[in-house]
Amino acid sequence: MKKSENTRRGFIKQAAVGTAGLSFGSIFSSFKGKSYANTLESNERPAGSHHVLQLRADPIPTVRVGFIGAGNRGGKAARRFTFIEGIEIKAICDLHENRVKNTQKTIIDKGFPHADEYVGEEVWRKVCERDDIDLIYITTYWANHTPMAVYAMEQGKHVVTEVPAAISVEECWSLVNTAEKTRKHCMMLENCCYDFFELTTLNMAQKGVFGELVHGEGAYIHDLRSQLKSKTNWRTKYYEDYTGNPYPTHGLGPICQAMNIHRGDKMNFLVSVSSGQLGMTQYLKDTFGEDSSEAGKQYKMGDMNTTIIKTEKGKTIMVQHDVTSPRPYSRLHTLSGTKGFAQKYPSPGIALEPDAHNFLDKDTYNKLMKEYEHPFITKIGEYAKEVGGHGGMDFIMDYRLIYCLRNGLPLDQDVYDAAEWSCLFELTEKSASNGGFPVQIPDFTRGDWKLLDGLDFAD
Ligand SMILES: NC(=O)c1ccc[n+]([C@@H]2O[C@H](COP(=O)([O-])OP(=O)(O)OC[C@H]3O[C@@H](n4cnc5c(N)ncnc54)[C@H](O)[C@@H]3O)[C@@H](O)[C@H]2O)c1
């Protein structure tokens, strides 16, 4: 064993010791899917597998799609797909018949043929097993993203999944290993990478407008306390025995793209600290009454989690998560470099040398944004705004996905992005539950991050 491997393993183990007895069980094993061996330390690539960086598959002139999950995200995604050329929707699957029917109606109203309907907990496997489907589009609960994605790839399908793609490091490895074994695309649907400010500032970063990036900040700060009123909400169950950042990818994804993570740099370790649990408890008292059973319920999740990541090249990234405080929505999206600075929230601004003490005035800002407008926005931005989906970013994502599949191009996000961004789910919990102890971030490319020199979207 090389010295560095030895050090790395010791690093993770120290963090893991303190989490013994941590009860992930109730939430992590709620899905009756395949179980995976604990591969936290497994960085040997299985014999016969090869990396899938810049993976190209045969062009698919008409992409035949199966949707698993027809709730909020799945129903909206199916609608967006009716605005894209070269699509056939073959199957719609959900636990609830009415959701399948509603999605069916949406596509039929747009002139699409009737899709086959699947209702039940295990019928998604049948969708994956069909031989007339190219792409499985997963929009179900967090705990079944990876089991479904892995099975879909094993059945020879390309797969995309909602965020986070995985909720443990071993799930991240299973996504990577399966994609490498099957040579199928596995993309996480990180739509925030396609938002207008993020894309244009990515273009600026790539063209050196900010000099060399030194630090980035991303977040998911979204007051979702009203979800606590529902007794059946699957998301709030996680708050009971988890503290960390369970939803890191919206903030982290665009920053990692700007910083060329696994395309010339890599994330090495993180430290994560959670605040106390105050706001959610206050909200429950205010909503249900001081003496109510709801207010008496114990939640482990701190209101605010703050994580700092250090990269191999000495860059830092801060990621925050807060869904239980009364405050305006923010994903921060801060890029700080040797020549300038950009930040999206609370209002978009850019500051550049030689006067980086001040944000650019409105006219100069608008001129710069136009000059560096990302090619995706120039090509499809206005149409995307008409179709909608978080202001258009969801449509740009879907459009690019189908464009790349139809043209046999590498996808904009690969399985390593999905694993790197999602592994924070478990690793922030490990660190935050151990006094902010540093935790190693696995290199899911197993050294191949050195092969690429920057992020290059295929065209
Ligand atoms: N990217 C974004 O902007 C964004 C926004 C909201 C939610 N999300 C993510 O999208 C995912 C879905 O969120 P949502 O808001 O649509 O939730 P939702 O509860 O509205 O929808 C999830 C659907 O999955 C179905 N489902 C669960 N298990 C299933 C199974 N075994 N087989 C078939 N269907 C099954 C449920 O019946 C439900 O209809 C989550 O991962 C969430 O984090 C992403």
Image: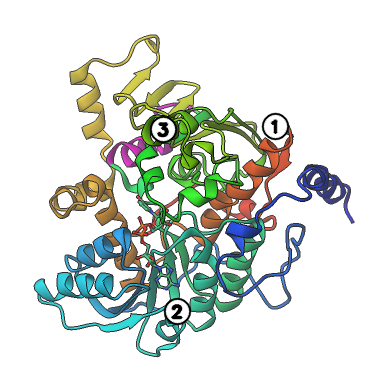
Residue type beneath disc 1: Gly
Looking at numbered disc 2 in the image, what kind of residue is underneath it? Lys
Residue 264 part of the magenta segment: no
Determine which of the numbered discs, if any, sits on residue 289 in the image: 3
Q: Are marks 3 and 1 in contact (CB under 8 Å)?
A: no
Q: Which residue is mark 2?
A: 157
Mark nearer the N terminus (2 vs 1):
2
Residue 434, by quadrant, is: top right
Q: Is residue 25 above or below residue 303?
A: below
Question: Quick one: label 2, few (<14), some, or many (20+) residues within 10 Å?
Answer: many
Q: Give the image quarter of residue 110.
A: bottom left
- Looking at the rendered image, the disc whose residue lies closer to the viewer, 3 or 1, is 3
Residue 394's x, y, as percent?
A: 28, 53
Rounded to the nearest whole Å, what is the CA distance between mark 3 and mark 1? 34 Å
Please indicate whether residue 285 sits to the left or right of residue 306 in the image: left
Q: Secondary structure at mark 3?
A: loop
Q: Please state which of residues 242 and 74 is positioned toward the viewer in this rendering.
A: 242
Which of pointers 2 and 3 indicates the residue nearer the eye?
3
Q: Which residue is mark 1?
A: 436
Q: Specify whether residue 200 is painted magenta.
A: yes
Observer-nearest of 31 and 270: 31
Q: Residue at x 16, y 69 (%)?
A: 106
Q: CA distance from mark 2 to mark 3?
A: 50 Å
Kind of residue at disc 3: Gly
* Any part of residue 51 in sight: no
Q: Are marks 2 and 3 in contact (CB under 8 Å)?
A: no
Q: Which residues are magenta?
A: 196-211
**Image check: 439 left or right of 115?**
right
| Mark 2 in CB contact with mark 1 (< 8 angstroms) | no
Graded by Cα atoms within 10 Å as few (under 14), some (14 to 19) or many (20 or more), the crowding at tag 1 reads many
- Marks 2 and 1: which is nearer the front? 1
Q: Is residue 248 left or right of residue 138?
A: right
